[in-house]
Image: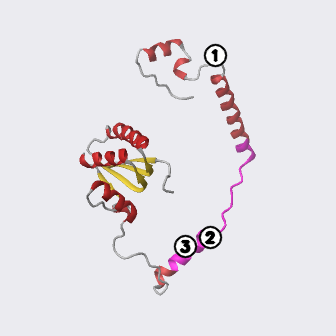
């Protein structure tokens, strides 16, 4: 598990731009992450960048330099496990927090059947969701219409993708093709 392959996910929200990294950040991975980050961060705008390193298993020298550089540029880091926080703090030299979404606020959830209303509502919901669901039976006309649609769509796709066929609607007609090449945007209602 220590040498897990590098993986990353971008979470593009309205107020926060998240970047979650998983696995080993080796020298090659650090270079790839830097390229991805530069591209993605060009679209930050006013959003706060946050990097989640909860699932980072190990960081080599280039990865350490990359994380320190991001930290110095004002990026916030979160780590939701003790091991990941210790790793991040050893690299950055500052405390790293757990993400807000993973912190429990107030008391943990407790189910109590001593309170009749809450307990019975839960029990009733559990019983209702446990009932078997039945599948719908489609009418033969519906199945036939669907099969006709599939056949028509497959024929159309085969014609468009055959050698010499035209895959894009804009290029089916020479006038439309010329207008598209001139930079015009072509739009038409679908049949």
The answer to whether residue 115 is above or below residue 73 is below
Asked if the stretch drawn in magenta spans residue 157, the answer is: no
> Which residue corresponds to mark 1?
164
Q: Position of residue 31 (x, y in %)?
A: 39, 39
Q: Give the range drawn in magenta.
A: 120-143
Would you say residue 81 is visible in this rendering? no
Q: Residues within 10 Å of mark 1 (few under 14, many from 20)?
A: few
**Badge number at residue 125:** 3
The answer to whether residue 113 is above or below residue 65 is below
**Badge number at residue 130:** 2
Residue positioned 36% across, 69% down in the render: 104
Q: Out of 42 and 121, give the one closest to the viewer.
A: 42
How much space separates mark 3 and mark 2, taking CA atoms? 9 Å
Q: Do the residues labelled 1 and 3 touch (CB within 8 Å)?
A: no
Q: What element carries label 1?
A: loop
Q: Is mark 2 on a helix, strand or loop?
A: helix
Residue positioned 68% across, 36% down in the render: 150
What number of labels is visible? 3
Q: Out of 38 and 166, give the one closest to the viewer.
A: 38
Q: Are marks 3 and 2 in contact (CB under 8 Å)?
A: no
Which tag, 1 or 2, sits closer to the chain's start? 2
């Amino acid at each position: 598990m220590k040498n897990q392959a590098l993986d990353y996910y971008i979470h593009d929200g309205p107020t926060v731009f998240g970047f979650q990294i998983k696995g080993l950040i080796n020298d090659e991975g650090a270079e790839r992450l830097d390229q991805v980050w530069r591209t993605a961060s060009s679209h930050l705008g006013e959003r706060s960048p946050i990097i989640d390193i909860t699932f980072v298993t190990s960081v080599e020298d280039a990865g350490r330099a990359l994380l320190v550089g991001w930290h110095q540029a004002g990026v916030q880091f979160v780590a939701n496990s003790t091991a990941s926080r210790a790793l991040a703090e050893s690299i950055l030299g500052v405390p790293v927090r757990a993400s807000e979404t993973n912190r429990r606020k107030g008391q943990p959830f407790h189910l109590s059947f001593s309170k009749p209303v809450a307990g019975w509502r839960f029990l009733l919901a559990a019983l209702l969701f446990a009932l078997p669901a039945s599948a719908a039976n489609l009418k033969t006309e519906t199945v036939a219409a669907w099969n006709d649609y599939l056949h028509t769509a497959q024929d159309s796709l085969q014609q468009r993708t055959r050698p010499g066929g035209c895959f894009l609607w804009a290029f089916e007609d020479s006038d439309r093709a010329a207008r598209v090449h001139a930079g015009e945007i072509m739009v038409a209602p679908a049949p």
